[in-house]
């Protein structure tokens, strides 16, 4: 605790000691300036020092080695220091500013002293002394002080007069004046200028002069400029001499003038001096404002007065020196074959009007008929008229109060007149917000060139106003002004001849280009599998803001991005080899020389390519076409196909043999009987009874119906209670039947299941139920009824099998129409085992049983007399009958 108090007490003593020294004004005793001056020559080397009092070293806890220096806030390197215990000296390059010395006491920095450094140069010798006297005002002298001193320099002007005491004038500038009344009209003087500053002094050479030559008067007064009606192209200027001048001083005058606003002054030089107070300025431009000023000087003196105040005058008007620049714009023909011609002309420049233009006089004359004229006066710069197909000469003059201008002529060629030589080429280059147009012609035109330009818009190629300017014959370049940036113009150059203008050479151009205002309008992409066709519209001209150089198509998906660049004339492109069933982002960017702007759209490719679809669709279509063709062929040949797949089975009942057989059988009471009387079901087998005809029977059948067809006869044999009685009137048929040998065969019914006769189908239109079979059935039923009433049983005799199976000729005429089937239902035979006829049938049945092994007699049940049973079919096959007939033949 004591140690801390002692430390605080020691620092308090040091601070008190320093502050005491400062308070007593003893700062110079602590840190003093060894040098005698603080003003140094610029860029010289100088030294300054700071010192500490010895009795303060202990209390400060520092010495001169702790002192450092700064020049304008920048510390000076220690290599430039020189110090001992109490004094520190620094050597530095002299600059204007402040030099400070600092001391570091126990880590705390304090400023000991600050020097204000003034850096300059000693004065130069004054030169070129001149003096001017103003009446009743002052006598003023001027001199050239030489180089700049950069420090305060005093100038003393010493005027030494004859027989008078000298006068002095002290100033800090390079001029000094002796004021009135210490001025005399004429006396000899000696003038000396002395210059002095902290770094040195200098004195000028003496100037000897007479006061009379130093007088400078005031400028002339009341200057007036007006036009002289009697003299064209001239101005009359009048003035008064200045009032403040020596009484005996003779003045000489001088004038200067300029076209108002030009800034270029023209001085009037005359062979003789102007002593009068008026002057006529000639050869000026008519109706032009001129500005005039006047000054004066004393004769034999050295100094002109100042220029008078500026006055303006207007020269008289004159006829316009030039006709207006004339051009035309020819529209399309109307319904009556006339042309609308819009005339355009420009106002004359102020230098060409020579007055105020009061109006324009237009005249239109047919070139081949000067008597036909059209005149019109207007104050506008355009006029429209309708012209026919002939050539016309149009003139326009401008007139003012002084008269008419020269005529401006223009030829409008006839419709069928061929064009004149055109300009070879045109080049357009933007330069400094102007458009430089350069061209080359095959031969110089008679009346110069015309450059016209207008805005190009989508709504109309020439929707903008028409601008034009005329150039002379020798020109091959011109600058166009007033064009807007980022807008497209059509630039055309015409060669103008005496017979009319030539064909234009046109070129589009921009004053300045930029990126397009918007991207192209993209249509919905046409997706075909992995190919996409992209179409877009061209950006409207007013939004292109430059020439489209190319289009870039960017398309990307999750797997990557690609880009394709096409030229500016392409507005459709097909992207190929894309990923299947993939979403894409597509950008179309339109680019100018300054950059591009794009539009975006999304699309998705198909899961199947056209080839995949073709692989699926083409086979399906081919199969479909094949099926259609097969169906058409089948429909066209349905009868052939039906006959091939379901051949018509011959109907025995419709044959000539069957007809004969029925008649002969029933007349001779030789009705065949069923083998199994009383059977109530249809067996799967049929008994075929083949008849063997004798030669006599065959001849009888042939004579009976040579053209009839042989049908297969289906006979149902049933047994009655008694055999049929033989008729005596049918002996011939009975003998024929008895002479026939019969053999019974069993045939599988399955192969002919569609041919099973059914009495209920007698009215069907199928081939097995023809009209012939119906007739046979009717006749046969009558004979069966007769047989039933006889009550007799009959069965054909058994013949050998080898006698039946004979070769059959398939080309036999008897077989051609044998397509009908006759179903017969015969009364069954009674169950009488004692009847010999029944025994015969039983034997036959046994024979059938032996042949087939399929008939079971136990399944048969007896039937009541005169009770119908299910018919059993008996067939004579075509093959058997054909074979038999062949053998007989």
Image: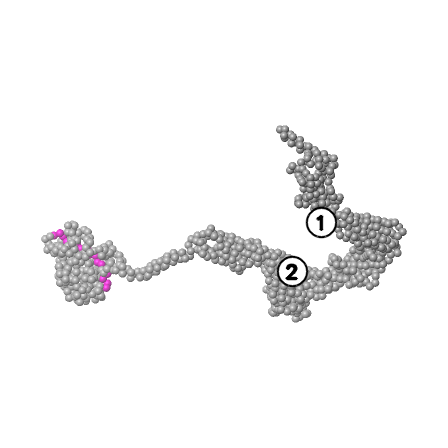
- Left/right of residue 619 with respect to residue 425 in the rendered view: left
Residue assigned mark 1: 43
Residue 342 showing in the rendered view? no
Q: How is the image coloured?
A: one colour
Residues drawn in magenta: 816-832
- Which quarter of the rendering shows the N terminus? top right
Secondary structure beneath dot 2 equals strand
State the residue in front, 519 or 323.
519
State the residue in front, 752 or 193.
193
The location of residue 670, given as percent across then percent down, is: 14, 59
Query: Which residue is the extreme one toward the top?
Result: 2
The location of residue 533, given as percent across then percent down, is: 48, 57
Residue assigned mark 2: 480
On residue 633, the disc is none
Query: Which residue is the extreme one toward the bottom?
Result: 368
Q: CA distance from mark 2 to mark 1?
A: 57 Å
State the residue in front, 549 or 393.
549
The location of residue 184, given as percent across then percent down, is: 87, 52
Please tell me how crowded label 1 is: few (under 14), some (14-19), or many (20+) other residues with Cα within 10 Å: some
Mark closer to the chain start, 2 or 1: 1
Corner quadrant of residue 847: bottom left
**Residue lying at 68% horizontally and 34% vertically, measured from the top left:** 59
């Amino acid at each position: 605790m004591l140690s801390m108090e002692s430390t605080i007490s020691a620092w308090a003593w040091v601070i008190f000691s320093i502050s005491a020294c400062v308070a007593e004004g003893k700062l110079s005793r602590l840190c003093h300036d060894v040098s005698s001056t603080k003003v140094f020559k610029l860029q010289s080397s100088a030294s300054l020092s700071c010192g500490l009092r010895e009795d303060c070293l202990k209390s400060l806890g520092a010495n001169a080695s702790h002192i450092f220096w700064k020049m304008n806030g920048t510390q000076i390197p220690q290599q430039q220091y020189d110090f001992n215990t109490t004094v520190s000296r620094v050597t530095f390059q002299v600059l204007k500013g402040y030099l400070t010395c600092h001391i570091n006491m126990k880590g705390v920095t304090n400023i000991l002293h600050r020097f204000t450094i003034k850096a300059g140069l000693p004065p130069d010798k004054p030169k070129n002394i001149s003096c001017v006297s103003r009446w009743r005002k002052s006598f003023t002298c001027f001199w050239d002080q030489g180089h700049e001193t950069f420090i305060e320099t005093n100038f003393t002007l010493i005027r030494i007069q004859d027989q008078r005491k000298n006068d002095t004038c002290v100033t800090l500038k390079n001029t000094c004046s002796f004021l009135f009344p210490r001025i005399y009209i004429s006396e000899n003087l000696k003038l000396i200028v002395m210059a002095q500053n902290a770094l040195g002094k200098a004195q000028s050479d003496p100037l000897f002069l007479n006061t009379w030559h130093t007088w400078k008067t005031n400028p002339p007064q009341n200057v007036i400029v007006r036009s002289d009606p009697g003299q064209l192209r001239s101005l009359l200027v009048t003035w008064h001499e200045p009032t403040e001048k020596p009484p005996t001083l003779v003045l000489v005058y001088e004038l200067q003038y300029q076209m108002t606003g030009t800034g270029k002054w023209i001085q009037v030089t005359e062979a003789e001096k102007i002593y009068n107070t008026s002057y006529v300025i000639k050869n000026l431009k008519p109706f032009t404002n001129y500005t005039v000023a006047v000054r004066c000087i004393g004769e034999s003196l050295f100094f002109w007065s100042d220029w008078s105040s500026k006055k303006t005058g207007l020269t008289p008007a004159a006829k316009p020196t030039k006709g207006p620049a004339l051009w035309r714009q020819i529209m399309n023909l109307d319904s009556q074959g006339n042309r609308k011609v819009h005339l355009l002309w420009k106002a004359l420049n102020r230098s060409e009007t020579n007055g105020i233009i009061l109006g324009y006089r237009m005249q239109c004359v047919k070139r081949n008929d000067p008597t036909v004229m059209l005149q019109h006066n207007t104050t506008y710069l355009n006029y429209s008229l309708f012209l026919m197909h002939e050539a016309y000469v149009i003139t326009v003059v401008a007139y003012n109060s002084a008269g008419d201008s020269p005529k401006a002529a223009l030829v409008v060629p006839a419709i069928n007149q061929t064009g004149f030589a055109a300009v070879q080429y045109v080049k357009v280059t933007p330069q400094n917000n102007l458009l430089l147009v350069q061209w080359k012609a095959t031969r110089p035109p008679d009346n110069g060139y015309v450059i016209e330009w207008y805005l190009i818009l989508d709504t109309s190629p020439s929707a903008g106003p028409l601008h034009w300017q005329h150039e002379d014959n020798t020109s091959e370049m011109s600058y166009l002004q007033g064009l807007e940036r980022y807008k497209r113009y059509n630039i055309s150059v015409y060669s103008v001849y005496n017979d009319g203008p030539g064909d234009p050479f046109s070129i589009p151009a921009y004053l300045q280009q930029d990126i397009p205002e918007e991207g192209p309008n993209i249509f919905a992409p046409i997706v075909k599998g992995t190919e996409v066709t992209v179409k877009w519209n061209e950006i409207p001209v007013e939004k292109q803001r430059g020439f489209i150089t190319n289009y870039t198509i960017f398309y990307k998906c999750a797997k990557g991005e690609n880009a394709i660049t096409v030229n500016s004339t392409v507005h459709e492109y097909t992207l190929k080899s894309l990923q299947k069933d993939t979403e894409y982002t597509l950008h179309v960017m339109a680019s100018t020389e300054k950059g591009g702007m794009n539009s975006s759209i999304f699309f998705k490719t198909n899961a199947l390519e056209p080839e995949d679809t073709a692989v699926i669709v083409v086979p399906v279509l081919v199969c479909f076409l094949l099926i259609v063709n097969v169906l058409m062929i089948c429909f066209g040949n349905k009868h052939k196909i039906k006959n091939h797949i379901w051949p018509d089975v011959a109907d025995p009942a419709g044959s000539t043999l069957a007809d004969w057989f029925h008649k002969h059988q029933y007349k001779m009471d030789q009705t065949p009987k069923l083998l199994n009387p009383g059977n109530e079901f249809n067996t799967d087998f049929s008994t075929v009874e083949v008849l063997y005809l004798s030669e006599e029977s065959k001849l009888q059948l042939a004579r009976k119906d040579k053209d009839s067809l042989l049908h297969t006869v289906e006979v149902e044999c049933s047994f009655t209670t008694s055999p049929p009685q033989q008729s005596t009137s049918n002996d011939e048929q009975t003998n024929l039947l008895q002479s026939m040998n019969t053999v019974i065969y069993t045939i599988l019914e399955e192969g002919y299941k569609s041919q099973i006769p059914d009495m209920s189908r007698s009215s069907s239109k199928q081939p097995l139920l023809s009209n012939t079979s119906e007739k046979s059935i009717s006749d046969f039923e009558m004979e069966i009824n007769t047989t039933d009433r006889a009550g007799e049983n009959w069965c054909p005799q058994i013949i050998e099998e080898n006698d039946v199976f004979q070769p059959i000729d398939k080309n036999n005429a008897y077989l051609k129409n044998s397509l009908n089937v006759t179903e017969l239902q015969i009364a069954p035979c009674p169950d009488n085992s004692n009847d010999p006829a029944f025994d015969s049938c039983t034997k036959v049945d046994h024979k059938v049983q032996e042949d087939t092994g399929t008939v079971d007699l136990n399944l048969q049940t007896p039937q009541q007399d005169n009770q119908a049973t299910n018919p059993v079919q008996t067939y004579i096959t075509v093959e058997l009958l054909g074979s038999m007939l062949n053998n007989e033949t």
